[in-house]
Amino acid sequence: MTVYTTQWVLVLVSSIILYFISPLSKTAAEFFQGNRRERAPNTVFLTSSLVISWLFAKSITNAANLGQSFGLVGGVAYAGYYLSFIVAGFVIVQLRNKGGYRSIHHFLESKFGRMAVVVFTFLIIIRLYNEIWSNTIVIGTYFGETGTFSYYAAIVVFTLLTLAYTLKGGMGSSIMTDVIQMALFIVLLGVIMGFILPEQGGTIQPFISSGTWDMGHGLDLLLVAVIQCFSYPFHDPVLTDRGFISDTKTTLKSFLWAGALGAACIIFFSFVGIFARLQGLEGEAPVAAAKYFGAPMLLLMNLIMVTSASSTLDSSLASFSKLISIDLSRSPIPKVSTGRLAMIALTLLGTIPVFFDPTILSATTISGTVVLGLAPVFLFWSKEVPRIAFHLSVVGGLLIGGILSFSTLPDFLIFTEGKYASLLSVNIITSTYCFSVYLISILFNKKPHE
């Protein structure tokens, strides 16, 4: 059996197994919240679901590529995004315990009105939309060059198979399969480390000492991640939805563990790129490293990408289903059928960008920049502000961040040097604006919120 054929077998068999393992959700609680027998997910299930849902195929590919470009600095820089779990965990628990809010949408509508929900929904739909194509194109690269028939065929088949088992159980399927996918990811990551560490004398010292810790060699991206972690998690319903399904003690514990475990996984996977760097390999780091070791490593890398991509896709579909059927619906009784139709619609629309050769890193950095206005909204959630404060910060941040992201900044606005110097400057400028208008709104708010 050829490597190409074996790759297809891995995709087909793993997806079929997940389909039969996935529970059939019949009630709204099972389909939209993952409750089984009236029980919410425990710490192990919730932590596993949180971590693997954020170990996207695009994320581990980006981590490896950044490790190849900057050494350990690159891996740590990308792992900086996992501070998002810690920020979101504390904020969501406060929203629930002190505010009594049932969801992010409930909080926004109660405090800022229906129009705020419309704006917020626009942001998270963009996020979920990006998650479809930015993960499936990673799968395609293991089956053929971009634009080839085998590349597109792998993407379409993989996407449809993931859709099939998610339609069956919704959030219930997502959380159940996440535990399996998380365990498999750790095993595969351990095996991959078993390939690359012996090639460097069996020690991690060459990996730890790789790279230079300065702005010109990846540290600028770490600062971008730290800035964005105060807003980035709140436009990701895959993360925030999981903050409202278990008790608050379990929720906080799970979010803290997820932040630590997720960051560790990202850093260790960046070793793949660091290995490519040390060996002088060129091209996409995971693919280059896999080809260096031959067929067994290529198959392992393919399977870990399938695992991470499917976990992200099923979570994105489940969150979009809940968004349409519960968060945006006025119906007192959410319909599972509506949720399943929403999944199908997102799958079809989210696959379209695949055919226009997009860049996967942009799905993270640009989307993180345009939602910087959410940071003051959630960090100062308990403060009384006029409703216009939300729009000044969020819509203003969206416009400023979006315009600056696609503009060439003058030299006097570039605060550092390095590949991501312009991105860092855009984030600093946009964040300064968002916090300023929001804090000024608090300062001059004379009429209590009604």
Image (cartoon, helix red, strand yellow):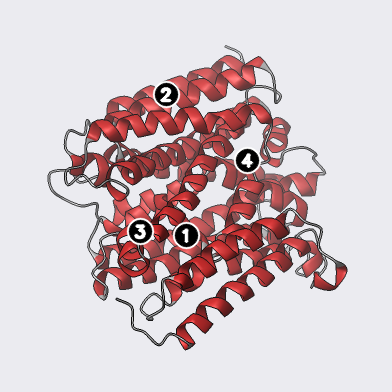
Q: Amino acid at mark 3?
A: Arg
**In the picture, residue 169 is in which quadrant?**
top left
- Dot 3 corresponds to which residue? 114
Q: Is residue 241 visible?
A: yes
Judged left or right of residue 430, residue 155 is: left
How crowded pointer 4 is (Cα within 10 Å; few <14, some 14-19, many 20+) is rated as: some
Q: Nearer the viewer, residue 256 or 448?
A: 448
Q: Amino acid at mark 1?
A: Pro
> Viewer-nearest of labels 4 and 2?
2
Q: CA distance from mark 2 to mark 1?
A: 28 Å
How crowded pointer 2 is (Cα within 10 Å; few <14, some 14-19, many 20+) is rated as: some
Q: CA distance from mark 4 to mark 3?
A: 53 Å
Q: Is residue 253 above or below residue 341?
A: below
- Dot 1 corresponds to which residue? 233
Q: Residue at x 36, y 84 (%)?
A: 447
Q: Residue at x 81, y 65 (%)?
A: 216
Q: Secondary structure at mark 4?
A: helix
Q: Nearer the viewer, residue 64 or 345?
A: 345
Q: Amino acid at mark 4?
A: Phe
Q: Residue at x 35, y 67 (%)?
A: 92
Judged left or right of residue 16, residue 29 is: left
Q: CA distance from mark 3 to mark 2?
A: 36 Å
Q: CA distance from mark 1 to mark 4?
A: 34 Å
- Dot 4 corresponds to which residue? 195
**In the picture, residue 396 is in which quadrant?**
bottom right
Label 2 with label 1: CB-CB less than 8 Å: no
Q: Nearer the viewer, residue 234 or 429?
A: 429
- Dot 2 corresponds to which residue? 161
Task: Name the quarter where the C terminus is drawn.
Answer: bottom left
Q: Secondary structure at mark 3?
A: helix
Rendered location of residue 172, percent (x, y): 27, 40
> Viewer-nearest of labels 4 and 3?
3
